[in-house]
Amino acid sequence: MFAILSYIHANLEALTAVLADIDRHGVERIVCLGDLVGYGPDPLACIDMVRERCEVVILGNHDQAAMFDPEGWGGPAEQAIFWTRDMLESSSDGRDARERRWSFLAQLPLTFSERERLYVHASARNPLNEYIFPEDIYNPRKMERIFELIPHVCFCGHTHVPGVFIDHAGRYDVKTRVFTPTGDEGEYTFFAPEEVGHAWRIGRQKTIINVGSVGQPRDGDPRAGYVLVEGELVRFCRVEYDSETTIRKIRDIPDLANFLGDRLREGR
């Protein structure tokens, strides 16, 4: 069994709670799909924790933006990234610690593959920046091009909305955990975690699984999210955490917009 987490966004309270939950399951290894930083108040601690605990870490667009200029960004997201960069450059724990963090971020890969499974931050077509929204099932040209690049299963995120995309129309039996195609190829289906009993068994169909977000959920559920993978079974997990502490930290930092914390209460 292993865990996949992503979109930590410098939320130390959420990351700590998720790792504690992972430890209770006896997980063998952890894969992280990026966005360690951005939006949140604890980028240094989160980088250090991910570096220590995760066997595989993929580059996220916020991680890249912290190293280079956030091209095309603006507003609170851009301001948060420049503040994060300042924290990375001026941390008080010494030159060696600063260099370790920069080196770690600089070496993160865009993708990782094993056993017909592809791991990316965003999509198989654009691993860093392309969103795959639930409503994209009605955009067959986009979905076809993305699915063509997937060997069998792709784990991703970027939208912060967990769920499962299938390259067929069909239905999923929660009791048997079997997906039955009901349409022709070229039709696509999206299932939110609650529609599949928070567990998906990988079948023959090509599948994209969005693992959700640890530190910035945007599906209306404020709890931190991640997935557990055991064989072909993928479980969507949610964990309560002390979001009010994170919100207070954000409010205490002038360079972080208050709404970056306030929205944690609603998972938006």
Image (cartoon, rainbow, N blue to C red):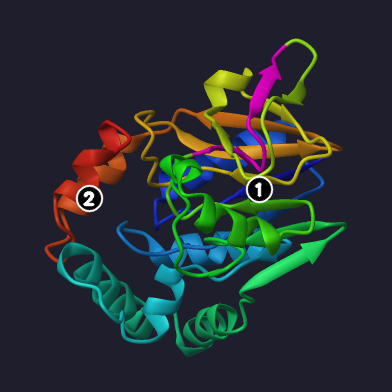
- Tell me the residue at 41%/64% (across/down): 37
- Tell me the residue at 46%/49% (across/down): 139
Stretch of the chain drawn in magenta: 162-174
> Residue 179: x percent and y percent?
74, 25
Instruction: State left or right for residue 91 relative to residue 140.
Output: left
Residue on which the image places disc 2 = 260
**Identity of the amino acid at label 1?**
Ile
Residue nearer the viewer, 21 or 149? 149
Quick one: which residue is furthest to the front in this view?
184
Marks 2 and 1: CB-CB under 8 Å? Answer: no
Residue 62 image label = none
Residue nearer the viewer, 265 or 182? 182
Q: Quadrant of residue 245?
A: top left
> Residue 94: x percent and y percent?
45, 84
Within the magenta stretch, is there residue 172? yes
Q: Main secondary structure of the magenta part?
A: strand
Q: Quadrant of residue 91?
A: bottom left
- Tell me the residue at 23%/71% (across/down): 78
**Identity of the amino acid at label 2?**
Leu
Within the magenta stretch, is there residue 164? yes
Residue on which the image places disc 1 = 4
Label located before the other in sequence (2 or 1): 1
> Residue 52: x percent and y percent?
65, 63
SS category of the residue bearing label 1 = strand
Q: Mark 1 Cα within 10 Å, few/some/many (few <14, many 20+)?
A: many
- Tell me the residue at 48%/60% (across/down): 46
